[in-house]
Image: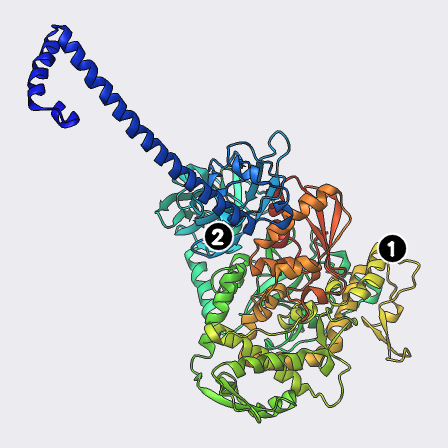
Amino acid sequence: MFVTVFGTKRKDAEEWVPSLRLLEHGHLCKDAAVILGCVSHRRDLMFYIIGGITVFVVAFFFTIKFLFELAARIVSFLQHEDRERRGERTIYDYVRGNYLDPRSCKISWDWKDPYELFYKNGQPFPAHRPVGLRVHICHMELAIDIPVTQEVLQEPNSNVVKVAFTVRRAGRYEITVKLGGLNVAYSPYYKVFQPGMVVPSKTKIVCHFSTLVLTCGQQHTLQIAPRDEYDNPTSNSVSLIDEHNYSLSIHELGPQEEESSDVVFEKSVVSNRQTCEVLFRLTLHSRGCFHACISYQNQPISNGDFDIIVLSENEKNIVERNVSTSGVSIYFEAYLYDAPSYTNTQWQLPPMHLSSSQRRPSTAIEDEDEDSPSDSQTPEKVKKPKKVYCYVSPKQFSVKEFYLKIIPWRLFTFRVCPGTKFSYLGPDPVHKLLTLVVDDGIQPPVELSCKERNILAATFIRSLHKNIGGSETFQDKVNFFQRELRQVHMKRPHSKVTLKVSRHCLLESSFKATRNFSVSDWSKNFEVIFQDEEALDWGGPRREWFELICKALFDTTNQLFTRFSDNNQALVHPNPGRPTYLRLKVYEFAGRLVGKCLYESSLGGAYKQLVRARFTRSFLAQIIGLRMHYKYFETDDPEFYKSKVCFILNNDVSEMDLVFAEEKYSKTGQLEKVVELVAGGAQVPVTNENKILYLNLLAQYRLANQVREEVDHFLKGLNELVPENLLAIFDENELELLMCGTGDISVCDFKAHAVVVGGSWHFREKVMRWFWTVVSSFTQEELARLLQFTTGSSQLPPGGFAALCPSFQIIAAPTHSTLPTAHTCFNQLCLPTYDSYEEVHKMLQLAISEGCEGFGML
């Protein structure tokens, strides 16, 4: 061993070896000690030399590495830092590590503690200084960007930045955190957010009906879709496996609403990894009308309240036969009563001015083409029960009285649509027959007693279910509408038909080109050719033609439609004072065009076409056959609503000398004539008791009667392509979304042109920041509903938010933690103050989804 290390001779080695052996055996001698001392001294010297060289090389290497790294970081930070910050930092700060290093920043995911930022040397970095923090969160499957808010905490946590965000969709997210343009340590992060716990207000019945028709003794199954706060399917929620969380209460409807003891039901839970279904299996053993409520943990679910009509086997067969009889009205004998608990005094005139001569007779055969609500006469208050006949058809529910047993007089007509509601009462005091109250929210309620009340109501409900396709939710109704519309035109070929038009006189050339088109031709795929242009129609010219022809028809410059006020935000309405050269046939053409857009949209894909127009609510209501009422003035004619309607509503009218008549003036301001709103209306005074009736009749005249011919011809063209019964399943707000869509609403444009009025520092700095974060997370449909809630229309004018007149205003309401309200005639959203982002989101979402659509929730 020693030979190799020191290079000694063999002889010396032979002498050293025994000495070493002596040492090993513990024997020490003088010669051995001298030899060991020499060897040890030479060995230490060698180690010192080698160690010194090694330390020098390592130190030199790390010094060079540090200098290169420092230079690279200085260059990198100088590139990403703002110019103002460069002057604040010296080279000494970089040398001692007194700067923010993104790669040294860490993030912990406990969702409670904030994220902490440090200097390079580990000291807390004051986050109130500009650090260029950027947080980007994206749903990987849906490609949805999540808005975030950042807040720097105060001392002693000045190095803490609170980053808040709300995840609405369950799934996998990518979270990127950057400082000065550089990723922090381990960024980007990937996190999976699971659905939350079941929220009763979001949990829904699939294929919901407000009224169920069941057979006594037969089982019926209800499917429940559990959802969390943000409408995510809670398929993996632990609470789903506990069926005792769900409960069902049923009581009989009538004068004594007692808990029914013989209602038998079963419930079971079926779940898997992808979806979860909660099934209620009901079996009722007693005939009658009941009200049911489904709850989760004693909280009613979203649409868990519904009525149940239970029929016997024989009654069920009668109802099925009635519904299957197509196009024939089924009648029932009944008695017409006054309903004191439902009496709507706004519909009553002084008795002296109403007589039977004001009733309009109808034909003996049910006329399905009549616009029933607007044609029905003003009802008189029934003094005593009278015998009437109730006719139920697939489209209408009519109440008629026969004079001399052969002459029919129509008293009331209701549409078979979701807006017509039934209430079930006990036996009447005279004939002891079960009572039914019919109310559509527009006409006065009608109370009827009928021996076959349950069969009558079940026939109406089954006809309604057949009309709307099995569910009352908007999306389900849209799917049913498009499916049925495709079925209507299934036998008509969707081949191409050439349409040659002139760009310079588009309306005239388009009307002439389609003048002889049949319904089959309108159902074909238009191949549009613009004169003097060589472009081939692969879809582009067709879409451009739809866009241009809608503008030509519905733009007020062409005078086919008009506005009630002189601003480009006002909604368009048929023009009763149109020029003589615009014949009524043009309205038929406009109706066919709208029907064509609806049919093309039902085909889906590249065929989807939207109607580029912003129709008045009253015009949309007339399309689906609703009666006019004064609230339509708020969106359609806001100036008239503010100047006259609000004044009458809020003041005593007994001294105003108003009568049931309307003065009509010419464009020059001269009185042309006085139009009586009712027979003899010039002598009927308006009082505080009947002023609502006066305003409703005024709306009927100004919004409907003056444009009856125009609307009738528009409907004639529309109904050639789209059956009337399919349109009747929507309300006027849903019809606008169906025809016109939501448009492309830009949040950036919204934020740039919205005007914030009033408010404290907390409102402007915190509530408004939360508000814009919530709005940024909205879908296009939710943005359209917010726009509809505030302005009365889901469509923006061509210039976007900048073209709104008056501008979109966000008013600081003097309330706290309440629902937002809106004034559509002023484009004002009244926003209260809130304590958190979550509260803003909850209240705003509730207002636009559950609030009063179209008229501002006050």
Estimate the x, y position of residue 369 in percent, counting from the top left. Answer: 61, 77
Task: Tell me if I can see residue 445 in this picture.
Answer: no
Q: Please name the amino acid that badge 1 sits on.
A: Asn
Task: Tell me if I can see residue 308 in this picture.
Answer: yes
Q: Nearer the viewer, residue 416 or 555?
A: 555
Of labels 1 and 2, earlier in sequence is 2
Estimate the x, y position of residue 194 in percent, counting from the top left. Answer: 43, 44
Residue at coordinates 53% horizontally, 55% vertically from top-left? 210
Dot 1: what SS? loop
Residue at coordinates 76% horizontally, 80% vertically from top-left? 576
Estimate the x, y position of residue 503 in percent, counting from the top left. Answer: 62, 88
Q: Which residue is mark 2?
A: 138
Q: Indicate left or right for 820 with 101 as reference.
A: right
Total count of labels: 2
Dot 2: what SS? strand
Mark closer to the observer (1, 2): 2
Residue at coordinates 48% horizontally, 50% vertically from top-left? 169
- The quarter of the rendered structure image containing the N terminus is top left
Q: How is the image coloured?
A: rainbow
